[in-house]
């Protein structure tokens, strides 16, 4: 069966699978493709229209698979290429599109190219594929510049012959030199490799960082330099024009979805011009505080920027890099985006979940596509108390734990049962899940939520089903309605209204309406505080 429209990326509900933590088919404590295939019915029932898979390629797992040794091989921990092909086919049979993750900024230090570069002398063409430089200081003992890794520590590592190589992330992730045609053609080939296997879209990792100023100039780290030596260089746009040509060369065009993490929304929108990426994640919205005026301003800015380039907006609340939003919204102070990744000593999980439900209805009603990170449909919180010796994220280790890192949002999903592994691994599995699951998660498992009609899982299913069935939702216009302070209200089409109450007190709902769905039981004819409702209005 062919999925329903060709411009699905403009409106779809897209579910992010983090394969390592979704479901473990063979009992080694690590999620895998067999696990995903055994849960496709669950995903179909949830009502999502596309799946985005975080990397499943051959990797030493120095950064959870974002360090790729070979884009054309599946890591044996996850399965085989034949299994990936079967998974793509089985998803399509259920009208579910498939997006794979491609990482252009860097490869693994075990990638063939990097091994050859290490074996070749300074100045060789093999080293040109990366950023090798001599060090500063009398004996080259100082890194070539002061750039810092995004994961903490210096962005340079020295090799035995004395040269240094650049890695904006971990040392196991050497940055590629995108000025070389060989790099470009290799990646375009990788895109074709997956498109030829039926993949419908590509998620482009760290998309705004690939190009570097070849002078590798130092800069003052206390201010945002303009121009920046490696963020958002104009050369990036040529790369994605090339990728777009590859995507458009298929009879049914494929979508490119960028991780473009830029504060300047106008610069962000330039990646979404008609001959570049189709869409990009809306991190401004993800980082927005839980406040009506701030959310409205962010929504308006988003819609205006996207309208300029004709691209669809996206709405994202969580992913594998940030603190889960139940926890973010459950903090007493939700006023700053800085909370995207930090320790959260005081969290009111019930409040966080209530707000998460309200915000889910907002995002699913806004124009564009919506992204759901695995486990958000279960209302999972961030796991904050993972022991240091079980932590895996290089961010935690490279910052000496001052940054909690991202393990807390990557804990394996609870499917059933009352204790670890909660059905994540088969009964009697030899190994524990690769990250410990909290003792308190029994009530959050899929099985537990199946039997509770008030659960987050039922709520997500209902919202997604209404969204998919309503012609005015997804892509298209919206209109704000007059509303009291702290309340957001807008219409889609002629008969759909979404109201979100962030005001702290119940508010009256409009007259002449029937309630399609509310995130919290209504209070007579009023919408409770910290709640949203979808209305059929006439
Ligand atoms: C992106 C990924 C993140 C990864 C980084 C380096 O931000 O989402 O998980 O660590 O790129 O590849
Ligand atoms: Ca496994």
Image: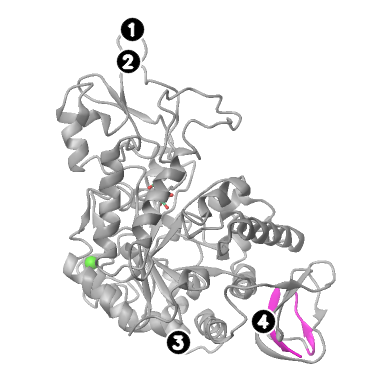
State the residue position of label 2: 141
Is the residue under label 2 in contact with that under label 3 (CB below 8 Å)? no
**Taking 339 as reference, is 303 above or below it?**
below
Percent coordinates x, y for residue 134 in the rendering: 31, 18
Residue identifier under label 1: 138
Asked whether mark 4 lies closer than 8 Å to ligand 1, one says no
- What residue is rendered at 23% in x and 21% in y? 123
Q: Could you say which quadrant of the image residue 89 lies in?
A: bottom left
Between marks 1 and 3 in the image, the one whose residue lies nearer the viewer: 1
Circle 4 residue = 520
Mark 2: few/some/many CA within 10 Å (<14, 14-19, 20+): some
CB atoms at circles 1 and 3 under 8 Å apart? no
Spatial CA distance of label 1 from label 2 is: 7 Å
Looking at the picture, tell me which residue is in the foreground, 89 or 322: 89
Q: Is mark 1 within 8 Å of ligand 1?
A: no
The boundaries of the magenta stretch are 524-538
Element assignment for label 3: helix
Q: Answer few, some or many: residues within 10 Å of disc 1's Cα (few below 14, many 20 plus, some between 14 and 19).
A: few
Cα separation, mark 4 vs mark 3, equals 18 Å
- In front: mark 2 or mark 4? 2
Element on which disc 4 rests: loop
The structure residue drawn at horizontal position 30% and vertical position 73%, both measured from the top left corner, is 36
Identify the secondary structure beneath mark 1. loop
Residue 92: image location, x then y, percent:
32, 79
- Residue that mark 3 sits on: 450
Are circles 1 and 2 on residues that touch, CB within 8 Å? yes
């Amino acid at each position: 069966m062919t999925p329903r429209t060709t411009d699905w990326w403009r409106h779809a509900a897209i579910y992010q699978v983090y394969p390592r933590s979704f479901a473990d088919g063979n009992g080694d404590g690590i999620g895998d493709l067999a696990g995903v295939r055994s849960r496709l019915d669950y995903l179909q029932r949830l009502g999502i229209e596309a799946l985005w898979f975080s990397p499943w390629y051959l990797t030493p797992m120095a950064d959870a698979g974002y360090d790729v040794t070979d884009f054309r091989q599946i890591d044996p921990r996850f399965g085989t290429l034949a299994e990936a092909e079967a998974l793509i086919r089985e998803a399509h049979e259920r009208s579910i599109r498939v997006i794979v993750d491609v990482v252009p900024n860097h490869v693994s230090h075990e990638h063939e190219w990097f091994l050859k570069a290490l074996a070749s002398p300074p100045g060789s063409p093999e080293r040109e594929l990366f950023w090798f430089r001599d060090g500063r200081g009398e004996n080259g003992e100082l890194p070539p510049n002061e750039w810092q890794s995004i994961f903490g520590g210096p962005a340079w590592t020295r090799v035995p012959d004395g040269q240094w190589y650049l890695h904006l992330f971990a040392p196991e992730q050497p940055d590629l030199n995108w000025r070389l045609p060989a790099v470009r053609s290799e990646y375009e080939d990788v895109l074709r490799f997956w498109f030829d296997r039926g993949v419908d879209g590509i998620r482009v990792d760290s998309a705004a960082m690939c190009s570097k100023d070849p002078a590798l100039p130092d800069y003052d780290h206390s201010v945002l330099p303009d121009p920046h030596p490696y963020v958002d260089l104009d050369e990036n746009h040529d790369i994605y024009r090339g990728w777009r040509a590859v995507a458009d060369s298929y009879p049914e065009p494929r979508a490119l979805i960028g991780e473009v993490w830029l504060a300047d929304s106008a610069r962000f929108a330039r990646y979404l011009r008609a001959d570049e990426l189709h869409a990009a994640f809306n991190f401004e919205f993800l980082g927005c505080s839980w406040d009506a005026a701030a959310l409205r301003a962010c929504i308006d800015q988003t819609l205006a920027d996207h309208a300029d380039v004709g691209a669809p907006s996206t709405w994202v609340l969580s992913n594998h890099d940030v603190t889960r939003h139940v926890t973010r919204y459950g903090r007493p102070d939700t006023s700053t985006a800085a909370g995207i990744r930090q320790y959260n000593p005081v969290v009111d999980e019930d409040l966080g979940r209530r707000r998460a439900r309200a915000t889910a209805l907002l995002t699913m009603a806004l124009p564009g596509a919506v992204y759901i990170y695995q486990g958000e449909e279960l209302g999972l919180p961030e796991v904050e108390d993972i022991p240091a010796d079980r932590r895996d994220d290089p961010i935690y280790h490279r910052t000496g734990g001052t940054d909690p890192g991202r393990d807390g949002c990557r804990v394996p999903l609870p499917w059933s049962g009352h204790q670890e592994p909660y059905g994540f691994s088969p009964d009697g599995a030899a190994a524990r899940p690769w990250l410990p699951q909290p003792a308190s998660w029994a009530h959050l498992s899929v099985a537990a939520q199946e039997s509770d009609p008030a659960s987050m899982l039922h709520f997500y299913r209902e919202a997604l089903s209404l969204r998919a069935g309503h012609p005015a939702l997804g892509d298209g216009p919206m209109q704000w309605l007059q509303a009291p302070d702290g309340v957001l209200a807008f219409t889609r089409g002629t008969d759909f209204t979404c109201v979100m109450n962030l005001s702290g007190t119940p508010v009256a709902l409009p007259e002449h309406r029937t309630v399609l769905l509310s995130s919290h039981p209504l209070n007579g004819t009023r919408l409770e505080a910290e709640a949203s409702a979808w209305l059929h209005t006439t």
